[in-house]
Image (spheres, rainbow, N blue to C red):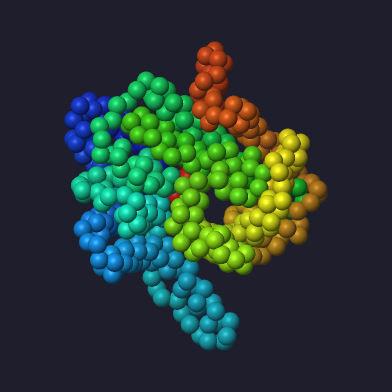
Amino acid sequence: MLFNSFVFLGFFAAFYPVYLLLQRAHRVQNYWLLAASYVFYGYWDVRFLLLLIGSTTADYFIGRAIGTTERPAVRKRLLAASLAVNLGVLGFFKYFNFFEASFVGLLRSFGIAADPIALSVVLPVGVSFYTFQSIGYIVDVYRGHVAPIRRLDDYALFVAFFPQLMAGPIERAPRLIPQVASPRRIEADQVHAGLALILLGFFKKVVVADNVAAVADAVFNHHEQYRGMDLALAALAFTVQIYGDFSGYSDIARGLAKLLGFELMVNFKLPYFAASPSEFWQRWHISLSTWLRDYLYIPLGGNRGSEQRTIRNLMLTMILGGLWHGAAWNFVLWGAFHGVLLVLYRRFDRAQVEPVWPARMARVVLMFGLTLIGWVLFRATSFEQIAHFFSHAGIERSADTAWFAERVLWCALPLFAIEALQHVRGDLLALAKVWLPLRVGVYSAMFLAIVVFAAREQTEFIYFQF
């Protein structure tokens, strides 16, 4: 069920009044929210729902078992069992086709005839997100950072909470579980902030992202027909698209959660204003970058060892982070690219003091350009396509260049204006706090843009496929 669909609007219109009426009956309200979350997820495919319920049940009982024993060997075996279940599910559904095709291709390159297994594996939506959320919970219980959840329905709601189930943010148990277990009050300012986030999220998705997608798709899907500025504009279009699409989803998720009395973590903090790779990853997909830091990079040793070990840990973390995004070599290359940037900037940043604003602006522009290069690797579907982009981009123009530039600028500039305000104010909710007449005017303009200029073809959020 897509947020940007009439089906979801009908679903939420039927669900929300009952949810509000149940505020004095916390347990019943939770049951209603859990049932709605399962309907929301099962709408895609009931088989996916059965998988979600199965992995939820397994991790609930494993977490309870870890919490009832002090024997290190038993606790390790239980942790290993949870990791085997979660990573096994993720590996089979997400990476089976990738590794099978790669292995068959390797054998054929040595002249060994091999046929792929006739098995088509469909990726369940959101599996990467709820799997990592479940792993984080089990590891936190194992480390003693959080007590095992006593009630199965509370844990099920922690995993299946529908605003963030499909594409995050990847929540942590110490943050979300207390909100699940305790009665919630929905205040007027919370509703206002939630509606503002939902409006901004829809604007980012259906007006910005879906419209610039026309440029990115036209060029990336037929890259051999384009060169010069068209390639550069397509790269810029996808840079705008993926941010508008994913941060738009996160805004809608946070807004819906606020309407339900929950607070989700901020997943994006103006990432294209970052001046370095480390700052970029403190601003982009924060729930994933902090998850990788806490559950992969630090356990590998982080930066506690030699310089060579730190570089190894950074590269391995980023490559695996790239592979998390999808079963394709371009994601591995994208992760490695960002790993190299982190390694190179690591030495550079240690020798730097906080730059004055002209120097920082120059660094922001440089980092944006490097990020754009990375998005070409991310969006490409073959090494040949990557080579074409980097060897044929330039200043040459075509009959399509003016239309491409107009579409990208028309969509990107309003979003940049909003984010410039957020950056100057240092507040992601700055738009909800400006002078009331100005706020009403901006809200009205955004709503009108959604009604008039929204892309006519309904599209999934990009990160649903991850």
- Residue 21's spot in the image, x, y percent? 22, 25
How far from the left and from the top, in percent, is residue 307?
A: 62, 64
The part of the image, by quadrant, that contains residue 435 is top right
Percent from the top left, x then y, of residue 156?
26, 48
Tell me: residue 223, above or below residue 39: below
- Residue under the image location 61 percent in, 59 percent down: 339
Location of the N terminus by quadrant is top left
* Residue pictured at 47% horizontal, 26% vertical: 196
Q: Is residue 274 above or below residue 346?
A: above
For the point 60% across and 46% down, which residue is it?
A: 280
User: Can residue 450 be seen in this snapshot?
Assistant: no
Report which quarter residue 122 is drawn in.
Answer: bottom left
Residue sitting at x 55%, y 79%? 106
Q: Which residue occupies the foreground of this view, 96 or 34?
A: 34
Q: Is residue 279 found left or right of 265 in the rendered image?
A: right
Q: Residue 416: which quarter of the image?
A: top right
Decide: is 378 above or below 2.
below
In the image, is 332 to the left or to the right of 252? right
Q: Is 433 placed left or right of 19 in the picture?
A: right
Q: In this rendering, does residue 321 appear at all?
A: yes
